[in-house]
Image (spheres, grey):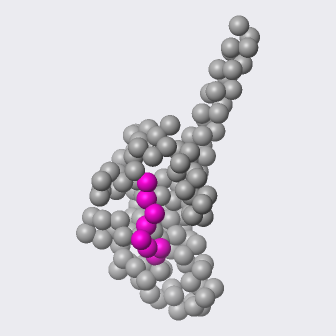
Amino acid sequence: MKIAQLIETRDIADVVVAHPDMSVIDAVALLAEKRIGALPVIRDGAVVGIFSERDVIYRLAHEGKGCIDTDVGTIMSSPPITVERQTSVDDALALMTRRRIRHLPVMDGTAMCGFISIGDLVKSRYAEVQHEAQALRQYIQT
């Protein structure tokens, strides 16, 4: 299955984003309010980074509470690791595992057309395995 199939029913306008000049405390509040783990960071329509709960934790551990008083652009992971619409779910899962990340912007050329999490990919792969198992059960019974 391709990433394009996962995001085809999603509206890009529903993706919650941050801006590099947004305060870290406001971005953390947004993560908490929306119950999400990461935000794509957008500047002038381009994805310039990813702001995640991990970014905050790592900075707090290394710099202390002063990092909360800075902006998202200072803390975000950049450059962002991305995938294309044509990327397979398995390839995206392998990339996330290899790079130890949990969120990926989906790109159509230079424009972001979606934002996926490892949970989206695992759910999709699980459904695919269940479908294959059902097909094998039916085949064996006939």
Above or below, comparing residue 8 to residue 56 in the picture: above
Q: Position of residue 22 (x, y in %)?
A: 38, 78
On screen, residue 75 above or below 101: below
Q: Residue 92: x and y, percent?
A: 52, 51
Q: Quadrant of residue 46?
A: bottom left
Q: Name the residue furthest right.
A: 141
Judge whether residue 51 is colored magenta: no
In this image, 30 relative to 102: left or right? Answer: left
Which x, y percent locates residue 26? 44, 76
Is 141 located above or below residue 104 in the figure?
Answer: above
Residue drawn at 60 percent across, 64 percent down: 100
Dominant secondary-structure state across the stretch colored magenta? loop
Please tell me which residue is depicted at 53% across the width and 48% down the height of the picture: 91
- The residue lying at 25 percent from left, 69 percent from top is 44
Q: Which residue corresponds to the image point at 47% horizontal and 80% vertical from the top-left? A: 75
Give residue 11's position: percent from left, percent from top.
Answer: 36, 47
Q: Nearer the viewer, residue 55 or 10?
A: 55
Q: How many labels sit on residues?
A: 0
Is 62 on the left or on the right of 14, as rendered?
Answer: right
Q: Residue furthest top?
A: 142
State the extent of the magenta-drawn residues as a range.
76-83
Evaluate whether residue 33 shows in this view.
no
Between 30 and 79, the one nearer to me in the picture:
79
Closer to us: 69 or 73? 73
Q: Quadrant of residue 65?
A: bottom right
Quadrant where the C terminus is found in the figure? top right
